[in-house]
Structures are given as structure tokens and as C-alpha cells.
Amino acid sequence: MPIHPLVPLDPPTSARPGWRPRLSLVAFLLVLAGCGDPLPEPDPIAEEALAALPTQTPLAGADYSELTLYEPLMEFVEALAVSPRVTLDTLGTSVEGRSIPYLKVGLGEFGAQREDRVLVLAFAQQHGNEPAGKEGALKLALELARGDHDELLRHVDLILVPQVNPDGGEIHQRQNAEGVDLNRSHLILDGPESRALRELFHRWEPEVAVDIHEYSPWSGAWLDEGWLRLFDMQIGLPTNLNVPEEIRDLAHDGFLAFATEALEGKGFTAHNYIVGSPESLRWSTTNVNDGRQGLAILNTLSFIVEGKRSEPRAEDMRRRAEVQRLTLESLLRFSAENRIQILNTVRGARERVREGEVEDFVLTMRREAGDGPLEIPVESVHRDEDGEWVVGDTVTARIEGWLPDIVADRVIPLPPAYLIPAGQDEVIALLEAHQVEIEVLDADMNLTVEQLTILGFIPHDLEGMVEIPETRAQEGNYRTAEGDVLVRTAQLRGLMVATALEPESMHGLLRYDRFESLATEGPFPIFRVTELP
């Protein structure tokens, strides 16, 4: 498309005003909310409703030998809805037309006490070949429906999606029926299931979220060393540096420690989520295309949990489902016991971005070695004379290539807005799908903008090698045309917008084939607006 000509301006004469911390009205009211009278005791569940509830999950009914498929899952969640604690609703439909159910679990009218209850969104089985999260979530849902955890529901509401990917779950396939990896779809939304999940988030804007998965310990590089990873549960944190530090600290110093203690107290092993090989090991991704970081960039206390997967499909499922159930219960308990801090932290961070008080944006990050090496327990393995793997004793793995520190590389002032010219229909449609607040501009308005020109590309390694553009910025005047769109960054989705639209962003749209037209040398067709109209 043609690029509107720019008229050079004189260099700016003053710096942007700095942000000054303050106690927001939201934070002040939340502090007061924690100082009132004790909450009333919940109403007991009628005996008729208790008698109508299932006595066990489908997995337990199959003696933990067969996974819960779609039809038994639907029958089970429909049966849970007889409880006054549970409301059954539908997220949307899968590629093959299966309804995706979710449960709203709480005391009284769901969502009626958002001012002083933490809302938790939990979703499982985005990957169809990782079933234990679904099974553990169904077990906890049954306990909640029976009133077993009413002390938690006095302070927490839960939205539970037990199976995001029913098509993949039916055939034990990672992707959905169109071959889309739903946990790599949270930026470009190329799966109907991920689009529906994001719409659910935007409808409620929960303070806490968890994406429930399993990992395979049988990795070639680890087996080459004679090691088998043994952690029953790995907990991944919001690590993208554009997520506010106070949210990242609450995740690491708060829930990670809380859940690890709870799991170890029940005989399970747990650890911060590590990925890679013994030659190069790091924390898991910073990329906003996954469920955890994709919600964290919206200033959410967001996690991914990864239980240890076994094959065949249902092997050791009693233990696998229980560690998932206990981890989810621990998140609800942590949220209940720390509700004031969570509400203050998350809602305060959201208010700052909505008020335009975020100054900087990290385009690229890099990993650095920290205190090391890392020493973790693993199980020793070797092949017997028949070529079968034999698991031996627990030993200590010493990892020299340990890169735990994530530091900012390229940082820019966060622009007040972006200007997307008419004709960039696919970019605009994607932002609308993310429910980004946009303004369609009148023609012949004059805006002060920066236009970036892509000069070339240089390699950058963080979680695999990517090509990052080298750019030159030129400031000038832009005269709007009919259909041009303004996107302000002073909104909840503002940091996600910058992540997507900045050409030098390591997680941006031009990393995807669908937006390859953006990744060409020459004038970049999206502008930074430096002065708002």
C-alpha cells in the first residue's frame, strides 16, 4: 500500500513527563474492603442437590484406566450444575462443532461481589494429548460442587474450562482439528477455541489465570546424559518484562513458594518451569502467543502449570490427576488467603496502564547466566540389553549452561498511540478480535507521528533465533485518510498492542506468515503517534 509522505519536524525540546507512584483510589478502597466485618457463612446445600451430584468422576469410575472422553465429560459437568455452587455455560464450539463447556463456581450470584473477591480463570487441555489437567480439574469441580471448599469460595470465584480442545482430546492429538497449536495462538488467534477463550477473559477480566498442561520427561538430550526429569509439577510464571514487576514478584515470591510447599507436603515434587537441554537451560517462554504470557501482558497474575506426563495415555493417571487437582486447589487457596494483595496489585497495575502511566516498552530481551551452575534432582536411566529404558536412582544433575536471568535489551518510550492506515484490514480485524479499543478517524486530520523504515534484519536469540529489524525513525506530520484507525496505548490491551505492532518487537506480528507483508525492507506501514489529537 502507498505510504503517506512525512514532513520532517524539529527535534523535540522536552522529555516525556515521568510517572510518580501514588495510592490509587482503587487500591485505597480495596484496603478498606479487607477491614470490614467477617463474611457471612455460606448457605448449606440441600440434601436433594447433594444426592443428585455424581459420587465420582468418570476417570475414577473407570478405575483410572480410561481417560474421560467428550460425551462422558459433558454428562458429568451437566450433572454438577444441580449444585447451587455451579453454573454451566458454553464457551463456543470447536472446529468439528463440539460445544466447549465451562463452569462458573461461586457462592450466591456469580460475579456479584467482584469488588472484594478474586476471580480465577482456569483452563485445561489446550493440548489434546495432555489430559491429566482436565481430569484433576473435574475432580476439584466435584469437590467444589459438594461444598467441600466453601471456605475458599467465600473469597474466590472460579471460571473453569476443563477442556479447551475437545477435538484434539478425542484422538489424543496436541493440535486442534485444523492443526493449530492453541497454546501458540493467543496473539494471532488462528483457532476458534483460542478466540473463544480470549473472549471469555475479556468478558470477565479475572485477576488470576492458570493454563493447565503436562510435559514429557522423556527428552532426547536429557536421555543422552542418562537423566530423566522427575518433577511431578512445574509452575511457569509471568516472565515477560513488560508485565509489571509487582505482578512478576507476586507470582515468584508468592504463589510459586506457596504451591511448592503445598505439593511437597503431599509427597509431590515441584519446581519453577525449566525448558531446554542440559547444554542450555532456561525458564519457559516470554512469548505472548501462549495462554500464560498472553494474559499476563494484560496485567493478570497468570501461570502455566506442567504436570509430568506418562505414556501410554492413562498410565499413572491417579497420581497425575491428583497433582493437577492439588495445584489448582493451591491456587484457589493462595488467592483466597492473599486476596487483598492480589486485588491491589492487579487492579492497580491495570489502572496505571489505562491512565497512560506506563512509560517504557521493552522491544527485545536477552538471557544471561545467573548464579550457577544449576543443580536439580533427576532420575538416572539406561537401556537394558533389550533396548528398553530402565529407571534407576535419583541423582543430582549439574547444569553449567544455566541462563535464568531475563534482562531488557532494546527499550523505547511507549508511544501514546499507533496509527493504522486504511487498507491494513487484517491487522485492524485482529485488534478487533482482541477487543482492543480503536477510533476510526475523520479524513484530513493532522497528526504528529514517527514513521519507521526497516533497513535490514539482524539475528537475535532468546528462545530460538529470530530476525529482528533494524529501523530508522523519522518524525513528521501525517494527514489522515478515510478509514484510518487510531489505537491508544492507555487501555488494558495497550501493552499487547505495542507487542504486536512494533516491528522490532521480538514477539510481534511480523514473526508470523500471515503478516509477512509487514516484514519487508522499506517504510513500515504502521505509525507511532507522538502527540494525541
Image: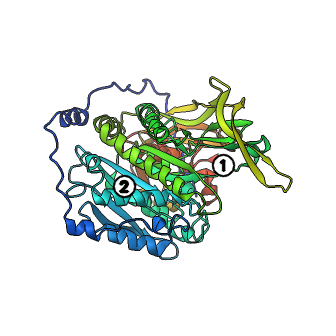
Asked if one can make out residue 479 in the rendered structure from this viewpoint, the answer is no
Give the vertical position of 101 relative to 459 (above or below).
below
Q: Which residue is mark 1?
A: 217
Q: Image quarter for residue 142?
A: bottom left
Side of 232 relative to 266 (left or right):
right
Give the vertical position of 441 relative to 314 (above or below).
above
Nearer the observer, disc 2 or disc 1?
Answer: 1
For image coordinates 57% across by 42% down, the residue present is 505
Residue 232 image point, x, y percent? 56, 46
Label 2, label 1: how far apart the Cα atoms are? 34 Å
Circle 1: residue type: Pro
Secondary structure found at label 2: helix
Closer-to-camera residue (54/332): 54
Q: How many marks?
A: 2
**In the rendered view of the protein, which quadrant contains the C terminus?**
top left
Closer-to-camera residue (244/256): 256
Secondary structure found at label 1: loop
Side of 120 relative to 312 (left or right):
left
Give the vertical position of 262 relative to 315 (above or below).
above
Asked if one can make out residue 324 in the rendered structure from this viewpoint, the answer is yes
Disc 2 + disc 1, Cβ < 8 Å: no
Closer-to-camera residue (462/266): 266
**In the rendered view of the protein, which quadrant contains the N terminus?**
bottom right
What's the mark number on residue 394?
none
Residue 22 image point, x, y percent? 28, 26
Residue 456 image point, x, y percent? 70, 42
Q: Which residue is mark 2?
A: 202
Circle 2: residue type: His
Q: Residues within 10 Å of mark 1 (few under 14, many from 20)?
A: some
Q: Image quarter for residue 247?
A: top left
